[in-house]
Image (cartoon, helix red, strand yellow):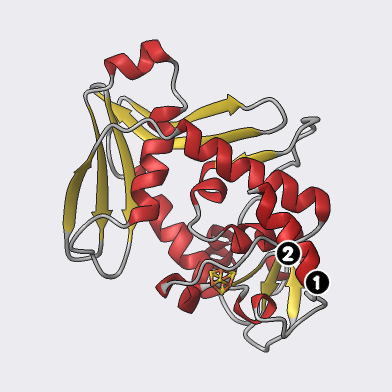
Amino acid sequence: MKIRCPDGSLKTTEWCANCNKCLPKPIKDALLPVERKRSNSEIPRFGVTRVTNKCLRSTYFDLTEEVVHDLEKLWVFSRGHAFHEHFKFDEKERFIKKNFGDFEVIGFIDAVHDSVIYELKTTNNIPEAPQEHHKLQAQAYYSMMSDEEKAKIKKILIVYLSLQKIKVFEVPKRDITEFLEKQGRILVTALKEKIPPNKTQSWLCNYCSHKDRCNGHSDDLFVSDAKRTKQASLI
Ligand code: SF4
């Protein structure tokens, strides 16, 4: 991971941690993420949010390109984490994994309390209805549970938290295992063939950190029509 410095240059997290120019050290220490060790699994492992992402092209770039964050974005992550710590649940950050043969999907359920799955979302603007990719994320956690665990789950709640408000939505208990498998297999193929999946354009493109790359502005994304057709036939 690289950090975009306020001066515009890209820095390693180590460099950023030892520099005191833009923010006091205790503030910055709380923002900088701890680099996770790479899994030594023999098959690809995708996080739940990678496979439930509406645009797998953006996931592909997340997986193959260096991730760059600016400090403001790290503050949003860090603030969300602090909010989550505030609540007293029976269980927080439950690790969950499902093996699909040639790949695995893994994730952490924000919380499970009294047999209810909680997905917590920190946001500036609370939506009128839960966002589709958030619903899929929460339903993915439910789907990845064993049949025995699923039978015990009473409901799935998505809780949106802003500095002013809290809004709770219940989403249907839907098993989306087939969808997860289909999405994961598209990613496996794309990574094997080194061809980014097709664009899925939506309002999320406005917030996509790969917008330039997606439109071929930053590197050699040229893929022949023949290859693209071949990829589409595998989906
Ligand atoms: S800009 Fe839009 S279509 Fe392109 S990768 Fe990002 S989300 Fe996908």
Q: In which quarter of the view is residue 211 placed?
A: bottom right
Q: On the rendered image, what quadrant is the N terminus found in? A: bottom right
150 lies left or right of 185:
left
Q: In which quarter of the view is residue 170 placed?
A: top left
Where residue 33 sits in the image (x, y, percent)? 61, 55
Could you tell me how far apart the alpha carbons at marks 1 and 2 are, in whole angstroms? Answer: 6 Å
Q: Identify which residue, 207 or 162, lies in the foreground.
A: 207
Q: Identify which residue, 104 or 17, lies in the foreground.
A: 104
Where residue 20 sits in the image (x, y, percent)? 66, 76
- Identity, as a three-letter code, of the amino acid under mark 2: Arg
Residue 204 position (above or below residue 105): below
Residue hosting label 1? 224
Q: Identify which residue, 88 or 50, lies in the foreground.
A: 50
* Residue 65 in view in this figure: no
For the residues bearing labels 1 and 2, Cβ distance under 8 angstroms: yes
Q: In which quarter of the view is residue 140 placed?
A: top left
Residue at x 43% of width, y 72% of height: 202
Residue at x 26% of width, y 57% of height: 161
Marking on residue 41: none
Residue hosting label 2? 228
Residue at x 33% of width, y 58% of height: 122
90 lies left or right of 96:
left
- Identity, as a three-letter code, of the amino acid under mark 1: Ser
38 lies left or right of 116:
right
- The quarter of the rendering in which ligand 1 is drawn is bottom right
* Residue 109 in view in this figure: yes
Residue 68 position (above or below residue 79): below
- Residue lying at the far top of the rendered structure: 148
